[in-house]
Image: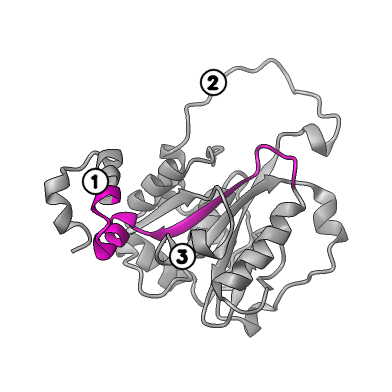
């Protein structure tokens, strides 16, 4: 069983490391604009957490792009509570040049030519992915006082992750609850800000909404830019010897 994963950038960064991917981290976005994204170096994708409402999926006219017309690796969400890891995979598996490590590289090769439903099944049945996902979850209290009555979708506590991924073909919204990827035009930062800001505005007022960026290791960015003060601060956050920083990413 896949457990609920807390929305935390540090936790997601550790999950990515446990999957075997190097030099990638997750940062929380406090503002959504081109300047803020440019400060993050390479932005591989954005993760958006929002309140799930069934009517948004039944009322939308956005049918997406048929899988055969897109080169993106897109999977339907089969396993309940797997949306966080699935959104992260949507970014990692669709970003060329990343060092995915042996296990995730093998998984990517296996699912590359499958249809979205079969990819979702592969994720749901992967012991490796489920183990790493559940390792990052808080222990659940085993208390059973009977079912909790749910009065409406507004009170059911269900939240959902999706990913926005810039590719050579353009910007795609990858949501495992939809039938296909959704194409949003150019993959530029300007267009990404415009598209995602419009989506975030639909959930304005919900304090649990969050937006995270999947980026290159910021220690590399600070080192390349000669921002020694930020590099030193980052080393403290990561608990790394500052004098060994020069070896980071090499």
Q: What residue appears at the point 52 percent right and 76 percent down from the top-left corner?
A: 167
The residues tagged by marks 3 and 2 sit, at their Cα atoms, a distance apart of 42 Å
* Magenta stretch holds residue 210: yes
Q: Which mark is residue 44?
A: none
Q: What residue appears at the point 22 percent right and 61 percent down from the top-left corner?
A: 249
Crowding at dot 2, Cα within 10 Å, few <14 / some 14-19 / many 20+, comes out as few
Residue tagged 2: 141
Q: Is residue 100 visible?
A: yes
Q: Are marks 3 and 2 in contact (CB under 8 Å)?
A: no
Q: Which mark is residue 38?
A: 3
The residue closer to the viewer here, 77 or 10, is: 10
The residue closer to the viewer here, 248 or 132, is: 248
In the rendered image, the vertical position of residue 4 relative to residue 56, given as above or below: above
Q: Position of residue 216 (x, y in %)?
A: 37, 61
Crowding at dot 3, Cα within 10 Å, few <14 / some 14-19 / many 20+, comes out as few
The residues tagged by marks 2 and 1 sit, at their Cα atoms, a distance apart of 39 Å
Could you say whether the residue bearing mark 3 is in a helix, strand or loop? Answer: helix
Q: Which residues are magenta?
A: 204-230
Residue tagged 1: 232
Instruction: Answer with the quarter of the image where residue 75 lies.
Output: bottom right
| Disc on the earlier residue, 3 or 2 | 3
């Amino acid at each position: 069983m896949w457990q609920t994963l807390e929305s935390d950038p540090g936790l997601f960064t550790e999950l990515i490391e446990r999957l075997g991917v190097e030099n990638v981290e997750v940062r929380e976005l406090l503002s959504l604009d081109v300047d803020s994204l440019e400060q993050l170096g390479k932005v591989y994708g954005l993760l958006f957490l929002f309140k799930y409402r069934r009517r948004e999926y039944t009322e939308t006219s956005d049918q997406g792009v048929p899988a055969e017309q897109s080169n993106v690796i897109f999977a339907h969400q089969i396993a309940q509570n797997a949306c966080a890891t699935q959104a992260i995979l949507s970014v990692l598996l669709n970003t060329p040049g990343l060092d995915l490590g042996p296990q995730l590289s093998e998984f990517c090769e296996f699912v590359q030519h499958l249809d979205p439903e079969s990819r979702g099944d592969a994720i749901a049945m992967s012991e490796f992915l489920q183990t790493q996902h559940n390792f990052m979850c808080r222990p659940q209290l085993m208390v059973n006082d009977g079912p909790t009555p749910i009065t409406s979708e507004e009170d059911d506590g269900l939240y959902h992750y999706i990913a926005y991924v810039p590719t050579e073909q353009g910007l795609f919204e990858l949501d495992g609850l939809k039938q296909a990827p959704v194409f949003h035009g150019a993959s530029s930062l300007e267009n990404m800000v415009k598209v995602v800001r419009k989506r975030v505005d639909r959930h304005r007022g919900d304090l649990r909404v969050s937006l995270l960026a999947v980026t290159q290791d910021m220690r590399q960015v600070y080192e390349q830019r000669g921002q020694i003060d930020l590099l030193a601060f980052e080393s403290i956050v990561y608990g790394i010897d500052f004098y060994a920083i020069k070896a980071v990413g090499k």
